Image: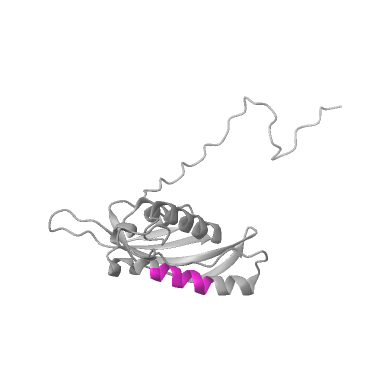
Amino acid sequence: HPQPSSAVGAIPTSSSAPQPEQPPEPSIQPLENGTILSAEVLSWHYEVDEYWFRIHALFQPNGKGDYLPPAKQLLLFRVYNDFYNLQHDLLREFPVEGGQQQTVGDEEPSRILPYMPGPSPHVDDKVTQLRKDELDQYLQQLCSLWEQGAEHILRHKLILEFFTPKAGDLEEE
């Protein structure tokens, strides 16, 4: 009797079998030296057991001399915890702007960082739709900080990291 042959498409068990080369991950260039001009949450969807918010943003890189490079349009997907972590980090980094510390001469701390919706014990489509609207308002208020003389926040590493495209996000000039 002939020996049984291995099944077509069977996974080799030998560790010496050649492995297919994986394509390299596209390198994500962090946003740096520029300002987020605008951002809005346009929609949400449910995927991989999480609600994802679709963000459209406009980033203006700094220029050199008289040259101003074209602005970059960003299409980003973030979960609620990304927003929550950003807010937490901003309040820690900017206690005066977050109203947690008063400046000399102020009777009460003055807050310019926007508020965002807090965590919810139960999240469903209805809660997510409400959050989408509130997070949209949060991003718009955040981007308007330059009107209050707080452009330094919009140029800060925390903001640029939040808006840096990740796998699945898009960046266009």
Instruction: Indicate the position of residue 40 as horizontal and vertical percent values.
Output: 42, 70
- Magenta residues (range): 132-141
The answer to which image quadrant residue 70 occupies is: bottom left
At 28% from the left edge and 56% from the top edge, which residue is drawn?
Answer: 34
Give the quarter of the figure containing the C terminus: bottom left
Relative placement, left or right, of 163 versus 62 is right
Look at the image and tell me whether residue 45 can be seen. yes
Is 94 placed above or below 42 here? above
Instruction: Indicate the position of residue 21 as horizontal and vertical percent values.
Output: 52, 37
Is 133 placed above or below 15 here? below
At 34% from the left edge and 69% from the top edge, which residue is drawn?
Answer: 144
At 36% from the left edge and 51% from the top edge, which residue is drawn?
Answer: 157
Look at the image and tell me whether residue 41 can be seen. no
Front residue of 151/123: it is 151
Relative placement, left or right, of 2 versus 119 is right
| Furthest residue in direction top, as rendered | 16
Magenta stretch: helix, strand or loop mostly: helix
Relative placement, left or right, of 107 versus 33 is right
| Furthest residue in direction right, as rendered | 1
Instruction: Indicate the position of residue 115 as horizontal and vertical percent values.
Output: 47, 67
| Furthest residue in direction left, as rendered | 66
Residue 136 on the magenta span: yes
Front residue of 1/125: it is 125
Give the quarter of the figure containing the N terminus: top right
The answer to which image quadrant residue 67 occupies is: bottom left
